[in-house]
Image: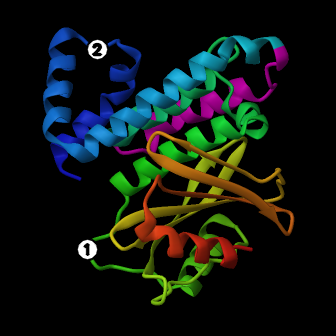
Amino acid sequence: MKPNCRRICDLLVQYADGTLTDAERAEVQKHLDACPPCRVIASKECGARQLLRACADQLRRTEPLPPDLRSRCQALSSSSTTTSPSWLRPSIRFAIAALLILFTGALLSIVTRQSDALLAAQLTADHVKCFGLFRPADGKTMDAAQAQRLLADKFGLDVHVPPSSADSGLQLINARQCLYAAGRIPHLMYEANGRDISLFVLEGETREPAEMTAFGHHTRIWSRGGNTFVLVTPAGDESSSDAAQYVAREAR
């Protein structure tokens, strides 16, 4: 990601909220018109915010405010001014805003546990952002055993990582963790025939099988062995279908 792209991404939360100055909005729009990757991220940002707002009234009527919301927001705010690089701080401010946009500002943790559509929206946004910010250099791949050790040693996560598959044209390129509910979840990043594929693992959570398409991506949700898996792939793309089926079979 180029330095100017990072600056634009720092402004996308305010862009989605319509709070930029006229000059800033014109700058962002000019960049988006010329930069397809940033334009994709912006569209997901705007779509996710609209979806959250559309559900806000119903969620306020049905869910209580969780007691740990204030402490989580304070922790995120503190980390944004101490340990985080300056270009990441707006992303942390967005995490706080996402918590506050529901139930007098936001409640993403309970919402995503109950709504498959909101879960799909959240993880699709994570998929786009992670590939935009954390894609390795061209050609760099990761061994599945290495990814499992990384998730276990660094994050304390016990996850089986589907390995790369030459038959399916699939390459594992990175393993990360993403914010979800009250904690973090593993995010496995793959490429298949030039397409980006994400596998998220929700440990200890089970859901009914579901599939949906939103924001240009197809999301498949299923549970196995006491965990829930969420597979995000490009919508309507046959070139990555074999790889997606392989990942779904191997995930456990």
Q: Is residue 154 above or below residue 236?
A: below
**Mark 1 and mark 2: span between their CA atoms?**
34 Å
Name the image colouring.
Answer: rainbow
The answer to whether residue 101 shows anywhere in this view is no
**Does the magenta portion include 52?**
no
Q: Is residue 83 above or below residue 71?
A: below
Q: Which residues are magenta?
A: 62-85
The image position of residue 141, as x and y in percent, is: 39, 80
The image position of residue 192, as x and y in percent, is: 41, 73
Marks 1 & 2, CB-CB < 8 Å contact: no
Q: Amino acid at mark 1?
A: Asp
| Image quadrant in which you'd find residue 20 | top left
Q: Tell me: 222 left or right of 7.
A: right
The image position of residue 245, as x and y in percent, is: 60, 72
The quadrant of the picture occupied by the C terminus is bottom right
Which residue in the protein does label 1 denote? 138
The image position of residue 10, as x and y in percent, is: 31, 33
Residue depicted at x 42% and y 44%: 84
Residue depicted at x 52% and y 46%: 124
Q: Identify which residue, 207 or 174, lies in the foreground.
A: 207
Disc 1: CA contacts within 10 A as few (<14), some (14-19) or many (>=20): few
Q: Amino acid at mark 2?
A: Leu
Q: Is residue 13 above or below residue 197?
A: above
Q: Which mark is residue 20?
A: 2
